[in-house]
Every structure is written in C-alpha cells, then in structure tokens.
Image: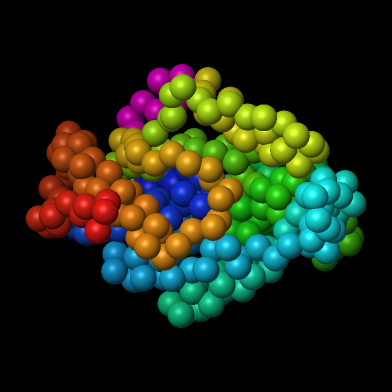
Amino acid sequence: MLPITGVFAGGGVKGVALAGAAAGTLDAGCRFEHVVGTSSGALVASLVAAGYGPDDLRRVITEVAWREMFTPLSWRRVPVVGKGLSILVSRAQYDADRLEATWERLLAAKGIRTFGDIEGCRLRVVTTDLTHQTGVVLPDQLAEYGHEPDHFSVARAVRMSAAVPFFVRPVRLADPRDGEVSEFVDGALTSNFPLIVGRWSEVRPLVGYRFREELPRPSMTFRGPASMARGVVTASIAAADAIRTPDEQQGTIIVKIPLGGDPLDFELSRRRAGQMFDVGRQAAMEAMPEVVAEAGRRGDTPSIMPLPAPVSEAG
C-alpha cells in the first residue's frame, strides 16, 4: 500500500464529500500515515486517523442526522428576529454539544478518545484562538494552554476546529495553571486549506482535498445582522483561498471535488448525503493515476488495487 499525507479543507456540510474522497483514496490502495484537517475537514481527518475504512466511512457519514447536530439557542427560537437577537445576546445561533457527542461515539467505536490513543496515522487539526488572535495546530500547541496533548479529547479538538463564528458558540478552554480562558472558533479563519501544516510531515505524496471553486462566485444579499455576520465569515475564508499563489500548492496533488451549494445548509437527507459522498469518492479515484505517478517519480513502488467502477450521482 502507498503511504500518503492527506490534507482536508473545510467545507461545512460538504465535508460529507471529503469523506467520500478519503474512501476513494483508501479503495485505491493508499494508506494515510498523516492527516490534517480544518473544520469539516478535521471531522473527516479524525475518522480516517481512527481507522475507518471506505465502507464504514460511507455508513457513518450518511447516517449522521446533520440537522440535529446543532441545537438552537433560546434567542434563536424567537420568530422573525431570532437570528439577529441570538447573535447579539449569545454571539451565536447554535450549540454544538451534539456534534461533539456524536464524534466521541464514532471515535470511541474505534478505541479512540484522546490523541494518545491514535496509532498508525498522525492527526493534526487547525483551529483559531479568538482570544489571542492567532492560529493554533492541535495537538501540537496544547501545551501552551496547559494541557497534555496525549490526554486531550480528539472530539473536543475537532469541535474547536469546526465552530463557525456567529453560527456555533466558540469553544472555551481554560488553562489549568492560571485559569485563563481562551475561546476557539473555526480553523478556516486561520487556514481553510492547511497545506503548510501537511508539509510538516515527511510522508509523500502529499494529497490535498478541497472543493472546486464556483465561478462566477455567488452574490449575497444582506437583510440583517445574521446574514451580515455570515457574509463576513464566508467572505474572509473565500478571499484567503482566492489569493493563494501556485507556489503554495507546488509538489501537492490537489483533488478538486466538483460540489457547490451552501456549506451551512444542514437540511441534508440520507440520500443526498450518499450522493455527495459518491461525488467525492469519484473525484479521488480520478486523481489516483497522478498520485501513483508522483510516487513513481519519488522512487516508491506502490501496490495499487484496481479502482472500483464509478458510482452514478443519481444512484
């Protein structure tokens, strides 16, 4: 099997397709030895590091009740003005306790609770320290906050990476040494496609998974503080990605998943989740010849399994 490093971009609910891309890569006979993820990419990377195979990935990702992962805060339930009120009073619209609990269960099924439990595949996730205005890579920088990396919950770490500002409550982390509390939000504000962290790994090829850019970019209409807050967040992430230079991706195989849509639309049926998964899986399968060629240039001799037949999106 061919060892690789995988980097998974953020994408909200479209992360279902990232799981499909991971499955397609595993189907082809590759083995992830190092995975990095931001936001929904961190959720997927954690499952890969835990040892979920292609069939298991499809099963657990499509069975997640995505609309139930986020619980509306009390102010969010007020008719008409609830979104804006919730942001003004609570700084968010939803709580993500159910998301963390679900990932705790999925990881525990593979014997994973803390970073110290992970074997065979190194996991890194990117988050943003809102309190100190800086990007943070977990578990590497946990010691700076007084926490032992090997004893820290993986589910809590990926929640810290996926806490979209104004949408989900920030994750509060207290330093046990002095009680200082830091608030963490979505890692996409630091790097939505953290190739630079992937390069910390010596394992090659380096394969990045992201979504194909939609052109022309959709326009937004702002009707109040909730839509404005959402626009600020999505624009900051999209703008950072748009100005990347070719040098940032040099030496990296990029799997571009052709999937548009609203990343925060969690009204997702199981059938639609399956379709999104298959789109990502197909995109990864199509990229595998390039992965093999890159391995050959480096002198590796991978054993690649025959690729599965393409899956119809309508299936």
Quadrant containing the N terminus in the rendered view: bottom left
Looking at the picture, does residue 217 appear above or below residue 19?
A: above
Determine the residue positioned at 58% across, 48% down.
Answer: 264
Q: In the rendered image of this protein, does residue 47 appear above or below residue 299?
A: below
Q: How far from the left and from the top, in percent, is residue 228? A: 74, 34
**In the visual, does 120 lie left or right of 176?**
left
Q: Which residues are magenta?
A: 244-252
The residue lying at 55 percent from left, 56 percent from top is 266
On whether residue 251 falls in the magenta region, the answer is: yes
Image quarter (top left, top right, bottom left or bottom right) of the C terminus: bottom left
Q: Is residue 84 magenta?
A: no
Q: Which is nearer the eye, 301 or 26?
A: 26
Q: Is 175 or 207 nearer to us in this picture? A: 207
| As drawn, 115 above or below 10 | below
| Residue 202 position by quadrant | top left
Query: Where does residue 189 sit, x and y in percent of width and height?
Result: 64, 38
* The quarter of the displayed image where residue 256 is located: top left
By what rule are the colours in the image chosen? rainbow
Is residue 249 shown above or below 272? above
In percent of the image, x 14 and y 57: which residue is there? 308
Question: Residue 239 appears at what percent x and percent y?
Answer: 58, 25
Q: Is residue 233 visible?
A: yes
